[in-house]
Amino acid sequence: MSTVTRRRVAGQSSNSDDDNNNHNSAGHNNLNSEKKIAYDPHDIDERNSTPKLTLMEEVLLLGLKDKQGYLSFWNDSISYALRGCIIIELALRGRIAMKKDPMRRSYPLADRYIEVVNDTITGEVLLDEALKMMKTSEPMSVGSWIDLMSGETWNVMKIGYQLKQVRERLAKGLVDKGVLRTEKRNFLLFDMATHPVADPAVKEEIIKRVCTMLITRVSPTSIDAQSDVPHAYLRSVSMICAAYAANVLENALLYLQPDLREQAFNKVDELMNDYSSWPFSNSAGKVEIPSGTELSLEVVASALNVLAKMDAIL
């Protein structure tokens, strides 16, 4: 599998995930790279444990037609699901958490208020845009944030919270990372930029991970132990549930036999039920919740709770 290069990683070579301790003064040159790159050390917050692709990018990649480079024109669910992924991604990265209020337990998960607990930028434009809005806004619930970022509001005072052109911006980000490429395609009376898959190995790895999670018996502990990325098992579960809500999961299951495909969808229902409640109730094994992350992971459960109810929302 070819390496995916992250955007805005200061002084990082294209074939390494190591940041080479490049937290030096602004404008310092990376002597280990063939090219010398000036950067601002406050511009990013990259670590070896940062995932190469965000949840939004993985869900979008599952929905894209490999050769044509565009999503199904009939998919009305993916935009809303992608906003839910933004909330989950920020929570998994420890940027947002539930407000520490004992009274919150008297409210449904989706109605509990969240807050920014770490405003360090991530280096991912959409995440940082959402993080900035949350930092400067009054406290709101997970459900409200997903609605507002999707433009699902009648309040003209809050229309500015809508994140626009999310799918196109994610696709361009995947182009930057070498996963997609950009082409012009003619659609009857107009030309449209499309983004076919340039590195099939990246999407194949996602599909393999989805199938492994859904048709084999896996232990949350073993998945977490094999990965340097925090919450690896929960991250995969969230991606699968979001892809299901976005109506793109079936693209990863096309080559399974019918009986295995049915088994996979049954497993998705099980995962959605287990992880859209708090605390999590996983029949496959206990998910380790590191001390101090409880309030952030409660946000993940809340966002999945919203996505689980999308049929009633859309």
Image (spheres, helix red, strand yellow):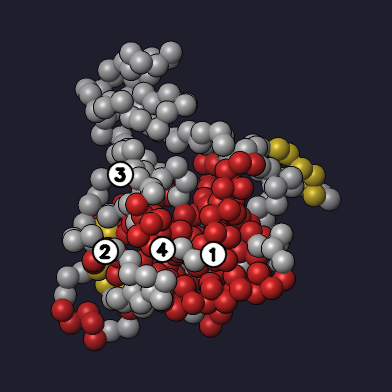
The residue nearer to you, when weighing 115 against 212, is 212
- Name the mark on residue 216: 1
Task: Decide if residue 163 is on the left or right side of residue 113.
Answer: right
Task: Decide if residue 168 is on the left or right side of residue 293.
Answer: right
In percent of the image, x 42 and y 67: which residue is there? 146
Give the residue type at disc 1.
Thr
Tell me the distance, in whole angstroms, between the alpha carbons under discs 4 and 1: 10 Å
Give the residue type at disc 2.
Ile
Dot 4 corresponds to which residue?
Answer: 219
Task: Decide if residue 134 is on the left or right side of residue 143.
Answer: left
The answer to whether one can see residue 180 in this image is: no
Quarter holding residue 36: top left
In contact (CB < 8 Å): disc 2 and disc 4: no
- Name the mark on residue 121: 3
In contact (CB < 8 Å): disc 4 and disc 3: no
Task: Decide if residue 237 is on the left or right side of residue 134.
Answer: right
